[in-house]
Image (cartoon, rainbow, N blue to C red):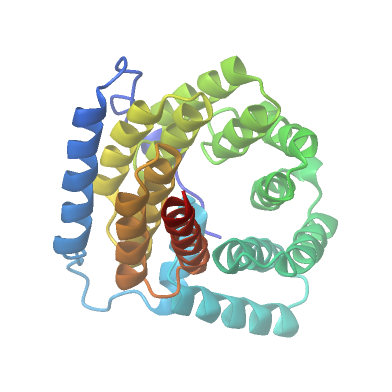
Amino acid sequence: MDRIDEEAQQPAPPVTFTGRKTLVAAAVAVVLIAGALLIRPARTGDDARPPGPSERAASAVGLGTPAAAVDLTALVADREKQVTRHPDDVASWAVLGSAYLEQGRRTADTAWYPRSEKALKRSLELRPAEQGNFDAMTGMGSLANARRDFGTGKKWGELVRAQAPRRWSAYPVLVDAYTGLGDYKAAQKALERLEELHSGLASNLRASQVYRDRGWREDAVVALEHAGGAAKTPAEKAYVLFRLGELLWERGDAAEALGQYEAALRTDPARAEALVLLRESSWRGVQASWRGLAA
């Protein structure tokens, strides 16, 4: 996995807590974000040869952003072939483990997690944590958090931070782990450090999650507005729309939430979790209507 040169990145103004936004302002923000995500085309580079599916997925996984399903499938196939030909390829095992994990997240299928763990452990066998195998260590932390083993996620994240405090990819792991453990003060500090080292989609999505977990839903919407502005690919746009749907549903705006889930699926039909929630939300709406008629 290509590493990001953290030292070369210039800090950007972080997404800060802006105070309680009114429900009207939040609703307007939701509409603006959704419109921008659905209408604004993905940007393209000026390179003569655009990156292929496997390269696009590797970049997304490395940056902690959603990858398109077809690209992720290509990355998995590519890295599986690579480790078959070169079983001692430390980096490819780490990439493969993270790709398996992302497949599990996208499909909501935890059967991918043991495969992720096996690949990441193989990478660590070839280059142990003491030798700075940061990609595999970060992957293990993310996997632990996905399994809701936040204590283990915290240990991996803190181990990476201790060895490489400016390595930004440790901080999303720490944000998720601290939040899962209920240590919101530590989660906020980790988030602020993440924003200093690596502003953009990944940090904005984490900010939204932190605010949501604190019950600051209007502030979570504002953070998603920043994420919507940073989203470039259909997979990234769909993920932001999906998260907007979750916030709207929690706020009781069932009709608007359904609209966001549908928009996420139109933008990225492979967004499995949006389809699951769309079905669940639709069924709950039907049940509510039945209760209303029976009352």
Front residue of 277 and 39 = 277
- Residue found at the very far front of the displayed protein: 295
**Residue sitting at x 34%, y 41%:** 200
The number of discs equals 0
Residue 97 placed where, x, y %? 69, 63
Residue 288 placed where, x, y %? 46, 53
Front residue of 137 and 292 = 292
Seen in the image, is 135 located left or right of residue 38?
right
Seen in the image, is 156 located left or right of residue 12?
right
**Residue sitting at x 77%, y 76%:** 87
**Residue sitting at x 23%, y 37%:** 27
Image quarter hosting the N terminus: bottom right
Classify 214 as above or below 135.
Answer: above
- Residue found at the very far right of the displayed protein: 125
Q: Quadrant of residue 5?
A: top left
**Residue sitting at x 64%, y 30%:** 161
Residue 221 placed where, x, y %? 32, 35
Q: Quadrant of residue 38?
A: bottom left
Front residue of 41 and 242 = 242
Classify 118 as above or below 30.
Answer: below
Front residue of 254 and 80 = 254
Residue 191 placed where, x, y %? 49, 27
